[in-house]
Amino acid sequence: MLDGATRLGLAHWLAETFLGDGVFPLFKLLYLGAVRVTGGSYFGLILLLWITHVAICLLFGWLLARFDLPPVTIAFALLPFGLAWTNLETLGWAMQWNAQLAIVFFLAAWHFLLETRKLGGRATVCFLCLLASGLCSTRGIISGLVLAIFVLMRSSNEERLRLSTVCLAPTVLLVAAMGLLAPHHVVPAGAALLYGCNYLLANPLYLPLPPLRHLFGAMAPLAFGVLKAAVFVWAFRKAAPATRPLLLTLVAFDVITAASLGYGRWSTNLATATSSRYQYIPLLCFGPSAGILVARLRSGVQVAALLLCAVALAMPWKRHAEQWDAWRGDNLRTAIEQAGPTDRFDPSSLTAGRARELMRIYGLH
């Protein structure tokens, strides 16, 4: 990213795909600004990830409260999402700020949909938020489709068609832009379906429940998928009618994300479908259903469940963070310092000499 920002003109760099993955000019501008503001400090960038994470937790908690969910449900929805060590890659790699920003804009648009102000102002802000979501991350492109589904389920007046069109418009525009700017690949339907289903069924329970993972072996994704579906169906039946569109929208978010990842990541190792990079959205989508289940328990059991969940999700952070620090931190820094000027770092095309030059230009440390 910084190589492109330095080597190309701004307009060319913003329109260029990143490793053939997608086009996200808004994130590029914000990322470049963050590097400048932090003085090239990687600690500063990681801190920015956590600040954004807190903002997402607050936005999501507020959204759940606006659907009149009880405090226990909200607490249990936010606790796994906020504390889970399985979010390690999203909270420990500065490049993942783009995925976070996409969710910030997505949740902001959802809040504006719930406003009672005149349609004109709401529609404009909602459109801009959803457009910004897709301009930050390829995963944000689907945000408009998800909220269009929500509008169609919830609205029953003349605003329904207009609002759903406003929500869907950014997705259509961004998909068209991706078709023009991003390279085209032939996607085998079977491989894409397999990857997407593995992601959808296994997450977010696969990583934090190793005993069940080992018990079911190769059938673990299917077993976790059945458990996940059972929790949702039970929560949907017990939820108030006004809450059900929220739960269905979150399921749609999970399913559409699985489809988009299957399309984009089918060629990678199937094990990556359950990596820590892809836990953020499943935790967000699953939390409210699990929270509704916990809220039906006795108060003493609720407290025990919250404490057990907090300990189980927070304790592994130290062990996994140390491994991540070596893999994505110390080892790479050492390689950049000691490698020859023409040595490269897969999958980047940069040489070690160019990396050291960029470190001097931006004061990276």
Image (spheres, grey):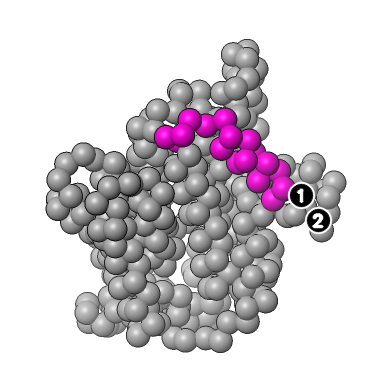
Q: Secondary structure at mark 1?
A: helix
Prevalent SS, magenta region: helix
Picture quarter with the N terminus: bottom left
Kind of residue indicated by mark 1:
Ala
**What is the C-alpha distance between the residues marked 1 and 2?**
6 Å
Residue under the point 18% across and 50% down? 119
Q: Residues within 10 Å of mark 2 (few under 14, many from 20)?
A: few
Q: Residues within 10 Å of mark 1 (few under 14, many from 20)?
A: some
Query: 271 or 324: which is nearer to us?
Result: 271
Q: Can you tell which quarter of the image residue 183 is in?
A: bottom left
Query: 109 or 273: which is nearer to us?
Result: 109
Picture quarter with the C terminus: bottom left
Residue under the point 67% across and 61% down? 198
Tag 1 residue:
223
Highlighted range, magenta: 223-243
Residue 268 in sight in this render: no
The reply to whether discs 1 and 2 touch (Cβ–Cβ < 8 Å) is yes
The disc at residue 219 is 2
Q: Is residue 332 above or below residue 229?
A: below
